[in-house]
């Protein structure tokens, strides 16, 4: 089931989420399920790619935008299955993303991530429910990145 995006992830701050200023890159657990590359195909045929490294850094491409971020995520999910996360943009090329927005460095974008049992898909949600999510983001096999 495809959930309609409520906004592009790179523009979550524009969706009135609370900014979190304490995000900073820290190594992720070696076997954390978020590590890797993820692809989001939006309804308007725009594609976003998220490459998240074990070092806590991420590279995000969305339409013409290329951004670098510091990514924090819980080591384990909460009892509800969601991982709390914060993605803080540290560098951006100043071009428009899939939502037509230009992301400003320094923006912190909190999200709650829910993985499919297969580990090959995830949803990024505004709350700890699936009513306001984008996704699914689909894992890109390592040989394809």
Image (spheres, grey):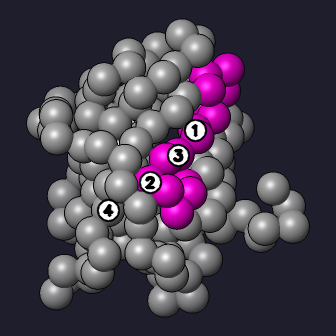
Residue 73's label in the rendered image is 4
* Label 2: how many Cα within 10 Å (few below 14, some 14–19, many 20+): some
User: Looking at the rendering, which quadrant does residue 128 occupy?
Assistant: bottom left
> On screen, 96 above or below 120?
above
Q: Which residue is mark 3?
A: 58
SS of the residue under disc 3: strand
> On screen, 36 above or below 78?
above
Q: Which residue is mark 1?
A: 60
Mark 4 or 3, nearer chain start: 3
Residue 56's label in the rendered image is 2
How far is mark 1 from mark 4, CA to CA? 16 Å
How far is mark 3 from mark 1, CA to CA? 6 Å
Q: Residue at x 29, y 81 (%)?
A: 76
Q: Position of residue 142 (x, y in %)?
A: 78, 68
The residue closer to the viewer here, 118 or 50, is: 50
Q: Is residue 65 left or right of residue 45?
A: left
Q: Residue at x 30, y 43 (%)?
A: 24
* Label 4: how many Cα within 10 Å (few below 14, some 14–19, many 20+): many
User: Marks 1 and 3: in contact by CB < 8 Å?
Assistant: yes
| Stretch in magenta | 52-66
Q: Position of residue 5 (x, y in %)?
A: 44, 46
How far is mark 4 from mark 3, CA to CA? 12 Å
SS of the residue under disc 1: strand
């Amino acid at each position: 089931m495809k959930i309609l995006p409520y906004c592009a992830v790179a523009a979550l701050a524009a969706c009135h989420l609370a900014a979190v200023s304490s995000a900073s890159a820290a190594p992720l657990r070696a076997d954390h399920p978020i590590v890797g590359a993820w692809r989001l195909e939006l309804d308007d045929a725009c594609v976003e790619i998220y490459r998240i490294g074990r070092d806590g850094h991420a590279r995000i491409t969305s339409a013409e935008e290329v951004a670098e971020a510091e990514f924090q995520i819980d080591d384990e999910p909460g009892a509800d299955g969601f991982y709390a996360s914060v993605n803080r943009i540290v560098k951006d090329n100043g071009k428009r993303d899939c939502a037509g927005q230009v992301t400003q460095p320094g923006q912190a974008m909190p999200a709650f991530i829910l993985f499919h049992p297969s580990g090959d898909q995830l949803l990024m949600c505004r709350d700890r429910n699936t009513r306001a999510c984008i996704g699914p983001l689909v894992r890109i096999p390592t040989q394809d990145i």
